[in-house]
Amino acid sequence: MFDRLMQPLATAVVATSLACVAATGAWAQTTLTFGGSDAVGSLLDRANSRFAKTVTERADGKLTVNFIQGEQLGNDIQVIEQMMQGSVHFYGDVLAWYANWEKDFGILNWGFTFDDNDHVQKFLDSGVYNELAESLRKKQGIRILAAGPTQPRVLFAKRAVKTPADLDGLKMRVPEIKTYLLLWQTLGTKPSRVAWAEVFLGLKTGTIEAAEGPVSAAYAQKFHQAASFLVRTDHLVSTYHITMNDKSYADLSPDLQKLLTDTARETVSWARKEAEGETEGLVQKMAAEGATVVKVDPGPFAAKALAGVQKMEDDGEWSAGLWKKIRALK
């Protein structure tokens, strides 16, 4: 009888003790999930891993970031949607994915808009970009912690491409981003949406005849082994960013918020340096492994893409005048 009477009291004492311990911070560790979507070993995969490890080491036991590599949680869109819902807390990849929710990010997918990394950085430092980032945060609950440029995107094809005419009718892989689809239609290809992880098999079997991507990510996926022509169109300058579920960010203490922001900026800066250092070396490596590197005059390709800019704005794919604003940032 005594034991039964004392049990509720003992339970209450234990619960109170645990609450006190948690309040002191001894048990206050938070574990957050970073969802991946890139090939293991690729530049962005390495950058995401670096961010997760650095935050965990610097947080002094108060925060752990669990990075889940590859597409274990799904493709890019699926991981972003999980971040919006809060089941995933971080995501890191190219900024262009957000065109699915904030249309003006679609300009990042339009070929020959940006000249180089410095040009992209000027855009990311501009008021135009800041307005887009803030709109994304307010409407979708996604906070961009940091963003920067990385590498040019190049074309991999199963046949030689030297002029825009060589693109006519080419079965081209594009991601699930509308502006990508419209760009490659404008350039004359027959684009279809294929998941990144399935591109190598698609090229190998002939389901698709071409694909494009940043040099490091494409090398990690071995595109050059399935489509032996590496065409230096350098049509886009790729980006890297780290984002976070905004509510999860707001729930953290100011010192942890600062830690995340500072580490994200450091990681993005590291990724840019790595990307710039890797580009030419990886192109040479792919050539040594059997790829035929084709250098093209970008002028005719840019002229053909330019013909679609007005149509994009007329169709509302991005805000009127945005392309000219970005070109003026040079």
Image (tube, rainbow, N blue to C red):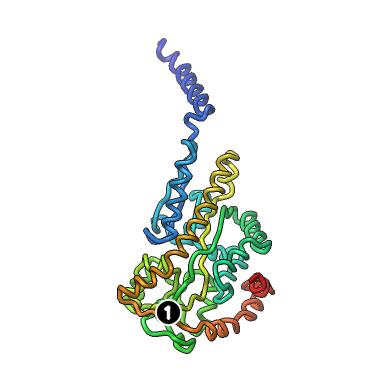
Q: Which residue is mark 1?
A: 231
Question: x, y (%) of residue 189?
Answer: 47, 83
Is 81 left, or right, of 278 in this rendering?
Answer: right
Picture quadrant where residue 139 is located: bottom right
Picture quadrant where residue 41 is located: bottom left
Q: Tell me, yes or no, if residue 209 can be seen here.
A: no
Quadrant assignment for the C terminus: bottom right
Compared to 97, does 236 lie above or below? below
Compared to 79, does 25 lie above or below? above
* Residue in the foreground of this view, choosing between 125 and 144: 125
Which residue shows up at 53% across the image and 86% down it? Answer: 300
Which residue shows up at 46% across the image and 21% down it? Answer: 14
* Residue in the foreground of this view, choosing between 44 and 288: 288
Is 289 left, or right, of 283 in this rendering?
Answer: left
Question: Residue most toward the bottom?
Answer: 165
Question: x, y (%) of residue 308?
Answer: 59, 82
Quadrant assignment for the N terminus: top left
Compared to 283, does 126 lie above or below? above
Dot 1 amino acid type: Val
Question: x, y (%) of residue 44?
Answer: 44, 59
Q: Tell me, yes or no, if residue 158 can be seen here.
A: yes
Q: Label 1: few (<14), some or many (≥20) within 10 Å?
A: many
* Residue in the foreground of this view, choosing between 258 and 79: 258
Compared to 286, does 121 lie above or below? above
